[in-house]
Image (cartoon, helix red, strand yellow):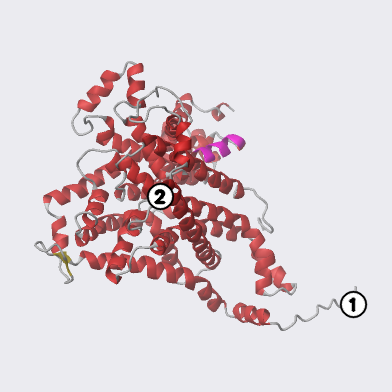
Amino acid sequence: MRSESSPWSLRLAAGSGLLFLHLPLAFILLYAFSSEDRSFEYPPPGYTLRWFGVAWSRPDVWEAFGLSIRVALLSTALALLLGTLAAAALARTQFFGREAVSLLLILPIALPGIVTGISLRSAFNLMDIPFSYWTIILGHATFCIVVVYNNAVARFRRLSPSMVEASMDLGADGFQTFRYIVLPAIGTALLAGGMLAFALSFDEVIVTTFTAGQQQTLPIWMLSELIRPHQRPVTNVVAVAVIVATALPILAAYYLTREGEYVGGAGK
Amino acid sequence: MTEAFVVAAPQETVPRRVSDALMARRGLFLLLLLAPPLLWLGVVYLGALFALLAQSFFSIDEYSGTIVYEPTLKTFSELLQPANFDIIVRTLVVSAVVTLLATAVAFPIAYYAWRYARGRVKALFYVAVMMPLWSSYLVKVYAWKLLLAKEGAVGWFMHAAGLSVVLDSWLAAPIVGGPSLSVSYTGMVLVFLYLWTPFMVLPVQAALERVPVSLIEASGDLGASPGQTFRNVVFPLALPGIVAGSIFTFSLTLGDYIVPQIVGPSSLILGQVVYTQQGTAGNLPLAAAFSVAPILIMGVFLTLAKRIGAFDAL
């Protein structure tokens, strides 16, 4: 059919759109090897591997990295628990106030991050709560819940209720049914949601600046380097490391939740 | 088969009794599931939002610089002062421009992925949109700082292509221009556009995926030109997706204070004001009052979006 071939103008628009989305990150890779350490001169006058070694031996980078990992792990764990519970409750039920509950779930990402940040800050201020590791977690877990929820609720809807009923009919109690039927079916969706939540928390900076006080997570470290650069090449190297560290869980999450994957009882 | 198939009665264990009790009372079961997430969001999130609202009704003592904990509308009235009101308007204009441009960039990508891409190409399109969406926010902003800097790559390529004149006359233009791309509205809008475009592609494509291709063919068979088909069939059906995407592009631009700080002109936008008021200026009430503006704007937006069914495209 002739209409199936796409017009060249559309191809050009879509292609340049995708190029626009990908080219800038390639420049970060290029600059990480630049031998120039003061300006963002293009093209770089020379190439070197030396900055990778310099970045590796910086204790402040490692400290920030460690805090980010610890925050992301605990926030993800909390979000997994709370998001899965919410998804299990909302996937196949209708009740009064259901709409309000789902609105409450998406509100933390529908409202600007700065609102979440300053709200938490006001609350800490009014209640005299000092900034700590836990105040960062409070913020992160709140907006990570919806990521887990979205992944889990989609999978819960594809899990046929007759699978659960069959399990109960065959004599399994609720906990056994959860362990042997529900969990295997939603496992990969939870893993994917967890990875996305981890990536989101690891990278968060807008809310974190309001809830961290003097502590430095990796994004806060980067932000301070962006505003007042001390050693630009080190920032370039850390940026590359962050690209790699976030790309891997995202790709993994994608492969775990591809459409058409077999789920027991789906399609019934 | 004459023998009845007998299933042994399950043993009366504690887990069984608990699960039986829960299965018998679906409402209680539902409540138990919902209680932890609702408590968390209700206490931490809504509680914090109310704390914010409470702060915005306090005011700051102009002489001592301390917060006066007495309800007043004084702080809100400060928002209407010309300087402050300008900031709100400016931010709205920037958000609207970013949203329009993001729609223009995102639509062809979503349209192509829906109409022509199949199998591997389609998966590739999806990953190609997901990767920039999820990759690090700060790294993306940083990449643009590298690109837009005076000695950076954009200037170099423009020069190499002999387009320096175009760039210079663009920078000389009022409003959009500035000393260099990295301190102009053009630069700021470009970075916002880059950051939020993936958030527009996904919902638009999700909305389009629900349109059967036969509908397009039917429109053509009934004599519509491709342009008419687009205006009267494709666009109205994609609209909920565009509105869903706008929720993100709008909300994210309204609340951002990092991009304008790193790439942007000296005149402030809303996020920056909130940030400086609560931080260095120590005026938490005014910061709180300012952040009520995006809440109201997004409230209107969300109500509108709900009415045209945009939530299904999220």
Q: Secondary structure at mark 2?
A: helix
Front one among B24 and A27: A27
- Tag 2 residue: B244
Q: Quadrant of residue A239 in the image?
A: top left
Q: Where residue B128 sits: x, y (%)?
A: 51, 37
Can residue B124 be found in the magenta stretch? yes
Instruction: Please tell me which residue is depicted at 21% across the width and 50% down the height of the picture.
Output: B88
Q: Main secondary structure of the magenta part?
A: helix
* Label annotation for residue B3: 1
Front one among B191 and A69: A69
Up-down: is A231 above or below B1? above
Whether residue B231 appears in this view of the structure is: no
- Quarter of the image for the N terminus of chain B: give it: bottom right
Residue A82 appears left or right of B145: right
Q: Where residue A236 sits: x, y (%)?
A: 42, 36
Q: Residues within 10 Å of mark 1 (few under 14, many from 20)?
A: few
Give the magenta range.
Answer: B120-128
Chain containing the residue with disc 1:
B
